[in-house]
Amino acid sequence: MTRIDWRKPADLVDGEWTSWYGARAAPGLRALAEFRAATAGRAARR
């Protein structure tokens, strides 16, 4: 039987990063996308 490793790298973020409403939602999602892009290379090196 083949064993599959389902673990994925993850980053913990403060809840304030994900609690935007209304006009703050779009800039907040952009900030998360920028954070993810900045940390993507780090995840590949793990």
Image (tube, rainbow, N blue to C red):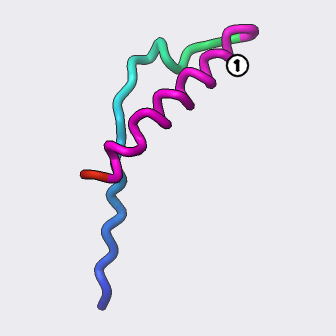
Q: What amino acid type is highlighted by mark number 1?
A: Ala
Q: Is residue 2 magenta?
A: no
Quadrant of the drawing holding the N terminus: bottom left
Q: Is residue 15 left or right of residue 10?
A: right
Residue for badge 1: 26
Corner quadrant of residue 19: top right
- The percent coordinates of residue 37 (x first, y second) are 49, 36
Q: Give the vertical position of 30 relative to 40 (above or below).
A: above
Q: Residues within 10 Å of mark 1 (few under 14, many from 20)?
A: few
Q: Residue furthest top?
A: 23
- The percent coordinates of residue 38 (x first, y second) are 43, 33
Which is nearer the eye, 6 or 26? 26
Which is nearer the eye, 34 or 23? 34
Residue in view at x 62 percent, y 24 percent: 29
Q: Residue furthest left?
A: 46
Q: Is residue 32 magenta?
A: yes
Q: Is residue 29 left or right of residue 43?
A: right
Corner quadrant of residue 6: bottom left
- Magenta segment's dominant SS is helix
Q: Give the vertical position of 16 relative to 12 (above or below).
A: above
Q: Give the vertical position of 35 relative to 16 (above or below).
A: below
Residue in view at x 35 percent, y 30 percent: 12
* Label 1 element class: helix
- The percent coordinates of residue 46 (x first, y second) are 25, 51
Which is nearer the eye, 32 or 39? 39
Residue in view at x 47 percent, y 35 percent: 36
Q: Which range is magenta?
A: 22-44
Q: Residue furthest right?
A: 23
The number of numbered discs placed on residues in the rendered structure image is: 1
Residue in view at x 53 percent, y 28 percent: 34
